[in-house]
Each structure stands twice: as structure tokens, then as C-alpha cells.
Image (cartoon, helix red, strand yellow):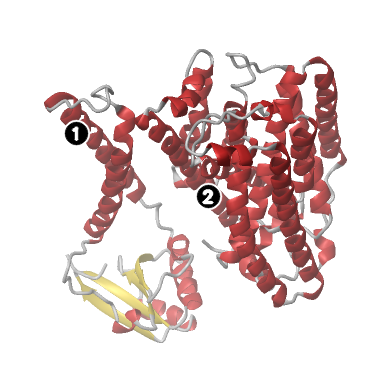
Amino acid sequence: MSKRLLVGVFESEDDTLAAIRASRQRGFKVVDVYAPYAVHGVEEAMGLAPSRLPWVVFALGVLGGGLKVWFEFWTTAVDWPVNVGGKPFNSLPAFVPVTFEVMVLFAAVGAVLSFFFVCRLYPAKRAVLPVAGVTDNRFAVVLEETDSTFDPAEVGKMFEKLHAVQVDEQITGEVA
Amino acid sequence: MNGRDFTFEPNAKTVGQMQVLAGIGAATLVAGLFFAPQRIWPNLLLVSYYLLGLALAGMAWIAIQYVSGAHWSTALRRVPEAMAGVLPLAAIGILSVLILHPSLYSWTGGVHVEGDAPGFKLMWLSLPFFRIRAVVYLLGWLGFAWAMLRLSRQQDSDGELSHTRRSTALAALFLVFFGVTFWLASFDWIMSLEPEWYSTIFGFYNFAGAFLSGLATLALLLVWLQRHSALKTVIREQHVHDVGKLLFAFSTFWAYLWFSQYMLIWYANLPEETVYYVRRLHGFWQPLFVLNLFLNWVVPFFALLPRMNKQRAGILVRVSIVLLVGRWLDLYLMIMPPFSGGKPRIGIWEIGLVAGLVGVFGLGFFAALRRAPLVPVRDPYLAESLHYHA
């Protein structure tokens, strides 16, 4: 389904933050914000819900650690028991370092892959940018025109009052 | 902002409580010297070493912030500086044990000379050299603390950037000196209580414990000062959050070293090394041994795992208290087994001296904090710290 979007382009992060706040205050839906670098306070201004990534990472860490303990137990105590220095076959302390490493590996690699998955990123994906300048020196606030009460001209004026250098209307199925 | 807005005056009630606690400690110490000297000396070493760890953690914190060029914490710097201000009190405690009661160390009655380098061990564990080393460590730390606190306070009047540069250079020197001497000090004062046993990682493990207890103390003090002083307007949620992250990280760091020491000894299974753990894993020591890991790592780790919890003052306070109790238990397990006759004994002598520890730290901290404005008012990086946004 295509969406009608209104893109306000700004030159400074302060104007961008002000535009986000003003848009939300007036009940508009901020779909996304583009910036050439990480801007502090954007998440709060956009009112984004806390990321769910930590839960995914936690689950992956537990999964990786659990699998590793099971695998080490199975190899050293079940499938091919080897007597090492007279210690019990199932020697939990000896498993800890590798379990720790595998837990970190699962959690860290999983975090990156989950992030790519959620953002639908993959190698050689073409960048989807509302305006080309956002990788250089411009900031963009993207609003969705949700219903007929949304007056692009009026919102454009609001953006211009906040020092927008450009206001675009775009119809797309892909941005954001 | 000017200095007068940020003078610190602790309320009389809190000071009174600290005086009562310090008094209980002093009374316990005096009574203990008469009625239970064999209990009181190792406990005096424990609380002095605990206090020393807090003071040096304050110094290490300041030095790390300077060397890493961290500016987020500039506004809070007076708090670790005041923690470092209790260093002389800790030095008095340590020296009184080493000077008045060296027989706490069994090797003073004759060194056990087996092992790899008996000649070196004989030389290292001789009482005059032992005391000279202690004086060198303590004077070195006191000298660095004196110089760095002085520079920081001079900056309050002139706001010169050169003080920050000189502090950074001093901080780098201090970290090198501290790294070596604290390692050796933990060998001398704690590990040599059982001179037949050794662990190379012991100094590192002791640093982790000391720094962790310092961070827990810092978190408690920040929350307290946020409620009871002019720092209310200075400490932001982001500052507290960062201290929470450090608590979480260093608790795990402590566990990492705790396990590293345990696993290597368990794996090698050499009798002269395992004796340390055998002693601590039998009878009533065992539950304490397990509890130590829970207080210092399991509880803080899971309590601080969610991001939100690292920002909540209430949770940080509870976790910090758990960690500070854990630090005491950790030291108790390092120091007491050779003195306790087979089973742990925790009674009036231990509790009395812990009360004294809290009181002495509180009074020393307040005295040091009153000596300068609550924030480094003319530090060039103060503004950056005040507007800190993680």
C-alpha cells in the first residue's frame, strides 16, 4: 500500500528536534527521522517505545550458553568420556569459559543479525533516502499524511517557520 | 555558578549518627584488645583494608576519568575526591596492625621455605622490609592524593586548564604506581596471612573487589547527595545511569576474576594451591563461600540487567548495599579462615568494627567534602558534564 508522506528538510539538529516535537504536539505521525549522525534525544522526541532488542539478545545468550553446556556435557561425559586428571567426566567448572564465549558469540552476532532483520537490511541493499542530503549535512523529518484533515500546505508552513530548507510531498511504498 | 551556592553542610542528625557508629567502633576496638585480641586484630585489618579500598577506588576513579578524557563525570568529581580524602584514616588502620601486631602474620614466627624460590621468599617476608614496603605504598598513595586534590581545588579559584593537564599527567603516573603497588600490597597484607599459599591473580582480584565496592559507595553517595545537598540540581538521570552501568560491568569483572582464580586452582589441582579453597569449602565456610558469589555477582547481575533498573535510584541503592555487604564477606573469606579455628564466627566484634567502619568513613567523607565546593566550579569541562546526555 502506498503512503503519502511529507518530508521536511532541516539544516541543524536543534531545528530537527523542534520540528519533531511540534509535529507530535499537533498529533501528526512522525514516521521516521533521517540524520547524518546520531542525534541525542531523537528517540525521546519521537516518543519511540523502548527497544525490544535486549530481550532478543538475552534469549539468544541463554540459548547459546545452554546449547554449549549441553554440547560439552554430551561430548565429554556421554558420547566419548575421557579421563582428564581424574576429574569427573561432567566437570562443570571446566565448561564455563567456553560457555561464556559461546554465549557472547550468540548474543553479539544475534544482536547484529536481529537488527538487520528488523530493519530489513542486507548486503547491497539500495539506500532508501527521502532526500540525498541526509547522508551529508541535512536532517529530514518524515510525516505520514494519515487522513484528509492533514493539510500539507499548513504543515509545510509550520516546518518553514522552524527553518526548514525544503518541504517535499512524496508518495511511496518504500520509505520507512 | 559561584562557589558559595555549592558549599556542603551535612545535617547534624546524620553527623550524629556517624559519630555514634564511630564511637561503637572505637569502643569495640578497645574492648576487643582486652577481651578478644585474637578476634579483633584480623577484624581491624579487614575494616582498614576495606576503608583503604574505598579511598583508593576514589583515586582510581578520578585518575581514570582524567586519563580517558571523560568529561561527563566532571560535575561529580568532588564525591570520589572526598572518598580519596579518607585515605589517611585507612593508612592509620593498616599501619597500626603492621606496627603493633605483626604476629598476625604467621611467617613472622619463621618462614616456610619450600617452593620455587625460598631465598626470595625469605627476603620478601622479613619484617623490616615488609614494613618499609607498606610505608612506601601508603606514602606514595597519600602523595598522589594530596597533589591531585590540591590541583583540583586550585582550579576552583583560577579556572586554569593547565591544572587539568597536570592532573592528567599525575593521573597517568598514579595509575601505573597504583597498579603495581596495590597488587603488591594485597600480596603483603592479605595473601601472606597464609604464606604457604599463592595466587598470581590475587592482586587483580583484590583491585576488582576494591573498585567494585568503591563504585557501590559512589552510587550510594550520589543518590544521598542528590536528595540532601545542592548536587540535586547537578546530578542528572544520565549520570546515575552511567554509574549503574559501571556497577553492572565491574560486578561481572569481579566474578570473572573470582572464577579465574578458582578455576585455575581447581584445574591444576596442586595441593599447595587447593588448600586455600579446601579450607573455605568445608563445614560452615561453604555457605558463606557460595553466598559471596551471590552477593557480589548473581544478585547485582540480574538486578541490573534490564536497562531501566540501572537508572532507578531505589534499585541502585539496594544493589549497592548488597555489594557492600558482599565486599565485607569477600574480605572476611580472604582474611579469617586461618584465625577462626575451623568455623566462621560472626559476632559482636565483627559487627562493632563494621559499625566503626561506616562511622569513620562517613565522618572522614563529610570532612573532606566540606573542604571544597560540591562541584569543581571553574573546571573548564564542567559545562559539558552539566549538559551530559548519554
Going 75% across and 42% down the picture, which residue do you hit? Answer: B90
Looking at the image, can residue B366 be seen? yes
Amino acid type at mark 1: Phe
The residue depicted at 51 percent of the width and 76 percent of the height is A14
Q: Are marks 2 and 1 on the same chain?
A: no
Q: Residue A2: x, y in percent? A: 19, 68
Provide residue A136's location: percent of width, then percent of height. Answer: 35, 83
On screen, residue B151 above or below B29: below
Q: Is residue B234 left or right of residue B280?
A: right
- Provide the chain ID for the residue under circle 2: B
Looking at the image, residue B285 lies above or below residue B58: above
Do residues under tags 2 and 1 come within 8 Å of each other at their CB atoms?
no
Q: Residue at x 72, y 51 (%)?
A: B136
Callout 2, which amino acid?
Leu
At which x and y percent is residue B298? 46, 33
Question: To which residue does mark 2 refer?
Answer: B246
Position in image of residue B247 (x %, y %): 54, 45
Quadrant position of residue A168:
bottom left
Q: Is residue B122 above or below residue B32?
A: below
Q: Looking at the picture, tell me which residue is in the foreground, A83 or B389.
A: A83
Q: Chain of mark 1?
A: A
Which is nearer the eye, B170 or B243? B170
Badge 2 marks a residue whose secondary structure is: helix
Residue B235 position (above or below residue A135): above
Q: Quadrant of the N terminus of chain B?
A: bottom right
Residue B225 versus residue A89: which sits nearer the camera? A89
Residue corresponding to mark 1:
A71
Residue at 67% x, 57% y is B76
